[in-house]
Amino acid sequence: MDEVGRKYVKMINQIIDAKPADMTITMHICRGNFRSTWFSSGGYEPVADILFKNCHVDGFFLEYDSDRSGDFRPLSFIQNQRVVLGLITSKFPELEDPEAVKARIQEATTYVPLDQLCLSTQCGFSSTEEGNKITDEDQWKKLALIKEIAEEVWKDC
């Protein structure tokens, strides 16, 4: 697994190294997003050292909306990259508790400085034509929640 992972990172880096200087490239690690379901679980530990430490992307979009994503310890391998914490689920309409989300962001600062962190949904609202089991109105509420939390958390950055 490590050898395959290293080959993937090397190939990605070769592509990224040829990008224009003003282009930003990020990577989303998806665990599945079809009709509010998922297909994989587990923390980022198995790939953190190889991927986070060595991949030349400018940032990672990481899913942290449920226990199946593991804890924030793998973030200790992040270099000088942005980490977009996907703490808000796009799968279900219920809104997350803003205080709980802020506490999770604070927990992540144990491993990555606040000015390198961002907040988003764990994935897009629709990875396929069928979408997730969430209405347009609920999607806008989720986005408003993200904006509200981000404005408070990053007000001094």
Image (spheres, rainbow, N blue to C red):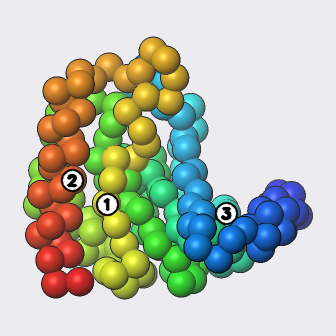
Residue drawn at x 80%, y 63% as measured from the top left: 15
Q: CA distance from mark 2 to mark 3?
A: 27 Å
Looking at numbered disc 3 in the image, what kind of residue is underneath it? Answer: Val
Mark 2 vs mark 3, foreground winner is 2
Q: Of callouts 1 and 3, which one flags the residue occurring earlier in the amino acid sequence?
A: 3
Q: How packed is label 3: few (under 14 Cα within 10 Å), some, or many (20 or more)?
A: some
Determine the CA span between mark 1 and mark 3: 22 Å
Give the x, y percent position of residue 17: 77, 73
Residue at figure coordinates x 57%, y 83% from the top left: 79
Quadrant in which residue 64 is drawn:
bottom left
Q: Secondary structure at mark 1?
A: strand
Where residue 5 sits in the image (x, y, percent)?
80, 61
- Quadrant (top left/top right/bottom left/bottom right) for the C terminus: bottom left
**Residue drawn at x 17%, y 27% as measured from the top left:** 137
Disc 2: which residue: 146
Disc with the residue nearer the chain's start (2 vs 1):
1
- Please say if 13 is above or below 157: above
Instruction: State which mark lies toward you, 1 or 3.
Output: 1
Is there a contact, CB below 8 Å, between mark 1 and mark 3? no
The reply to whether callout 2 and callout 1 are in contact (CB within 8 Å) is: yes
Amino acid bearing label 1? Leu
Question: Cα distance, mark 2 to mark 1?
Answer: 7 Å
Q: Residue at x 53, y 34 (%)?
A: 32
Q: Which residue is mark 1?
A: 119
Q: Is residue 37 above or below residue 124?
A: above
Residue 125 to residue 143: above or below? above
- N-terminal-most mark, 2 or 3: 3
Residue corresponding to mark 3: 47
On the image, the x and y values in percent for residue 99 come to 11, 61
Determine crowd level at label 1: few under 14, some 14-19, many 20+ residues with C-alpha closer than 10 A: many
